[in-house]
């Protein structure tokens, strides 16, 4: 396994990687959208998120993940939150989400708290965006002003959830293409992947990597194999930390793990694998510069949160995030 790379000087390369092209325009979103209609929204959301994370540190990663899985399907519209009914099939039971995405009960608590202070004003889509930011901050990550004004979708797409959420077995080329379809650059992909500095993954999603891939530290693979059986269907739901060192602290250890070939998911290690790949220098850069990672993660989060929002008179403001009005 090759572990020595030559890293060129970075200024021009980083500029090219982090240049943002093709972002979904969201001119009607603003950071003071609820300045008059619900000035209490931020404190209200933060209080519930803080309590949920105090009860279970893992919940911060779960709440952050909700925004990713929502935005990558129909856009940042809270379609992910809709429950199935006898006449409606939502996104929760799609393969990337079923028995995996979690935190819906916390969102329910947040929505109920917000409705008490500002009934019928704040969308579930905006709650997801605020909650993701608060989860990052509470776990030690960067802060940013969240753009708001999204409305909630009256539809969902089971098929698109299966097709458009990048799976853990994707190659770098597949990941890059998937993000590009959402208006996100290679730089965005690498920075946003840093969200895996917190949280856990199921054996089902990293089994192939620890048993079959060669781009993995052998001792790390053996350690994970001790808790994740080779046989498919055996221990599929067994959990392991995405970041071995600090799975509940938002920092740059994720990139240090990739440089050491200790990425848990195949898709993670793909960012630091191939000599000459454009992703390798930026992973190395983030591994040694937390401030740079934090800055670019914020840029990526703001950009991702702009993917096809419903604004104006489109959609609705749900009273209950699990069902349409």
Image (cartoon, rainbow, N blue to C red):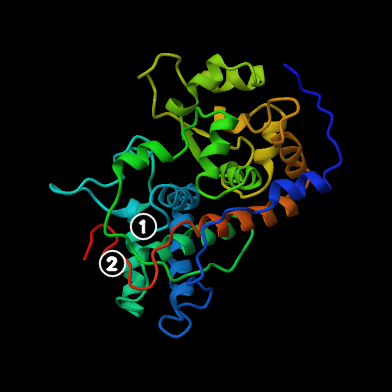
Q: Nearer the viewer, residue 172 or 21?
A: 21
Across and down, in percent, residue 259 comes to: 72, 31
Q: Quadrant of the C terminus?
A: bottom left
Residue located farthest toward the bottom when viewing the structure as drawn: 36
Q: Nearer the viewer, residue 225 or 127?
A: 127
Indicate the quadrant containing the N terminus: top left, top right, bottom left or bottom right.
Answer: top right
Which residue is found at the position 38% from the left and 59% from the top?
Answer: 77
The residue furthest right is 9
Relative vertical location of residue 8 with respect to residue 305 in this rendering, above or below: above
Q: Would you say the residues marked 2 and 1 are in contact, meaning their CB atoms lie under 8 Å apart?
A: yes
User: Quick check: 217 above or below 156?
Assistant: above
Q: Position of residue 153 (x, y in %)?
A: 31, 60
Q: Is residue 263 visible?
A: no
Q: Is residue 314 left or right of residue 247?
A: left
Q: What x and y, as percent, mark residue 288?
A: 78, 43
Q: Which mark is residue 318?
A: 2
What residue is disc 1 on?
78
Horizontal relation, residue 199 to residue 141: left or right: left
Q: Residue at x 40, y 47 (%)?
A: 73
Task: Give the image quarter of residue 176.
Answer: top right
N-terminal label among 2 and 1: 1
Q: Is residue 157 visible?
A: yes
Give how far across and how far down residue 28 sits, in percent. Answer: 48, 72
């Amino acid at each position: 396994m090759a572990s020595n790379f030559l890293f060129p000087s970075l200024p021009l390369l980083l500029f090219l990687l982090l240049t943002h092209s093709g972002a979904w325009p969201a001119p009607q979103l603003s950071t003071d959208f609820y300045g008059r209609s619900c000035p209490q929204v931020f404190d209200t959301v933060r209080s519930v998120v803080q309590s949920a994370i105090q009860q279970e540190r893992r919940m911060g990663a779960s709440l952050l993940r909700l925004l990713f899985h929502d935005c990558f399907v129909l856009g940042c519209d809270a379609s992910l939150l809709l429950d199935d009914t006898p006449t409606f099939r939502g996104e929760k039971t799609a393969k990337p989400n079923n028995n995996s995405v979690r935190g819906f009960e916390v969102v329910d608590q947040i929505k109920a708290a917000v409705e008490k202070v500002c009934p019928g004003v704040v969308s579930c889509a905006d709650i997801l965006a605020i909650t993701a930011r608060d989860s990052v901050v509470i776990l030690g990550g960067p802060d940013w002003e969240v753009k708001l004004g999204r409305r909630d979708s009256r539809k969902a797409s089971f098929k698109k959830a299966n097709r458009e959420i990048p799976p853990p077995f994707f190659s770098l080329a597949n990941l890059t293409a998937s993000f590009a379809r959402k208006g996100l650059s290679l730089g965005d992909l690498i920075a946003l992947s840093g969200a895996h500095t917190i949280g856990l993954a199921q054996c089902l999603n990293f089994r192939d990597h620890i048993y079959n891939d060669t781009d993995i530290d052998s001792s790390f693979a053996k350690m994970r194999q001790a808790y994740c059986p080779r046989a498919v269907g055996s221990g599929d739901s067994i959990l392991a930390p995405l970041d071995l060192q600090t799975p509940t602290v938002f920092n740059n250890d994720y990139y240090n793990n990739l440089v050491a070939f200790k990425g848990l998911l195949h898709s993670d290690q793909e960012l630091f694998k191939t000599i000459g790949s454009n992703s390798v220098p930026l992973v190395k850069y983030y591994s040694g510069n937390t401030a740079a990672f934090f800055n670019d993660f914020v840029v990526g989060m703001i950009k991702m949160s702009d993917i096809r929002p419903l604004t104006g008179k489109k959609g609705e403001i749900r009273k209950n995030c699990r069902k349409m009005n």
